[in-house]
Image (cartoon, grey):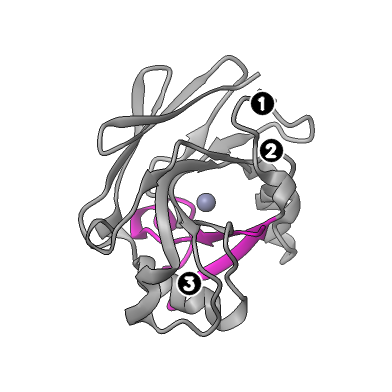
Amino acid sequence: MKIFCIGRNYVEHAKELGNAVPSEPVIFMKPKNALLGSRAPFYYPAFSNELHYEAELVLSVSKNGKYIPQKHAYKYVNQITLGIDFTARDIQNELKAKGLPWEKAKAWDNSAVIGKWQPLTADTLKSNINFTLEKNEEKVQDGNSTDMIFPFDALIANISEYFSLNIGDLIFTGTPAGTGECSVGDILKGFLNNEKMFEVEIK
Ligand code: ZN
């Protein structure tokens, strides 16, 4: 199982981190061990002093494929949820400044949280999917799938030019503006179209 992640897929988020808006998807990966178990506690990573949440729509791959044409992309995913791409922003900034890969900032054990899966149809994929993240009962991120620079079908087509998609792979589709710091004791709740998908306490 592989976890694909997309960076800078919302204009306002690219701007808030001082990044250029990309002309093709920015792809990185997390290993299988990055996925937090559904009942496992989330611990603040010892190597970071600046942990950031990034709420993202997550797709579940349901069919093996390579070189998937954009018009057939919807046949390769069948579930959606909201997740968090936890990021050690201090580590990422150091790595970016040196032009080094991001794994130490983004691909560590338990850095990927996912909520409960919702069935996905071609129609829901094309509709407005709204999602929000609350930190300690206050809304901190508010996103909509229609604001993605590269929509779901474009991401699936682009990823599959480089990597085989396999059943069970996950695709984190990027975060909107409003990413920020979290501390021990914070409670993060994610909502998809106003329905709660997950609740995570930072321990
Ligand atoms: Zn992200």
The kind of residue on which mark 1 rests is: Ala
Position of residue 197 in the picture relative to residue 1 (left or right): left
The residue singled out by tag 2 in the image is 110
The residue singled out by tag 1 in the image is 40
Q: What x and y, as percent, mark residue 72?
A: 36, 78
CA separation, marks 2 and 3? 24 Å
Relative to residue 60, is residue 181 depicted above or below? above
Relative to residue 45, is residue 136 depicted above or below? above
SS at badge 2? loop
Residue at 49 percent across and 36 percent down: it is 180
Which quarter of the rendering shows the C terminus? top right
Residue at 66 percent across and 49 percent down: it is 106
Instruction: Please tell me whether mark 2 or mark 3 is closer to you in this view.
Output: 2
Q: What x and y, as percent, mark residue 11?
A: 35, 60
The residue singled out by tag 3 in the image is 25
| Residue span colored magenta | 1-30
Residue 122 in sight from this viewpoint: yes
Q: Nearer the viewer, residue 23 or 62?
A: 62
Relative to residue 69, is residue 175 depicted above or below? above
Residue at 79 percent across and 35 percent down: it is 47
Position of residue 44 in the picture relative to residue 23 (left or right): right
CA separation, marks 1 and 3? 31 Å
Q: What x and y, as percent, mark residue 98?
A: 74, 62
SS at badge 1? loop
Relative to residue 183, is residue 51 depicted above or below? below
Residue 150 in sight from this viewpoint: no
Sequence-wise, which precedes: disc 1 or disc 2?
A: 1
Residue 202: mark in rendering? none
Label 1 CB, ligand 1: below 8 Å?
no
The kind of residue on which mark 2 rests is: Asn
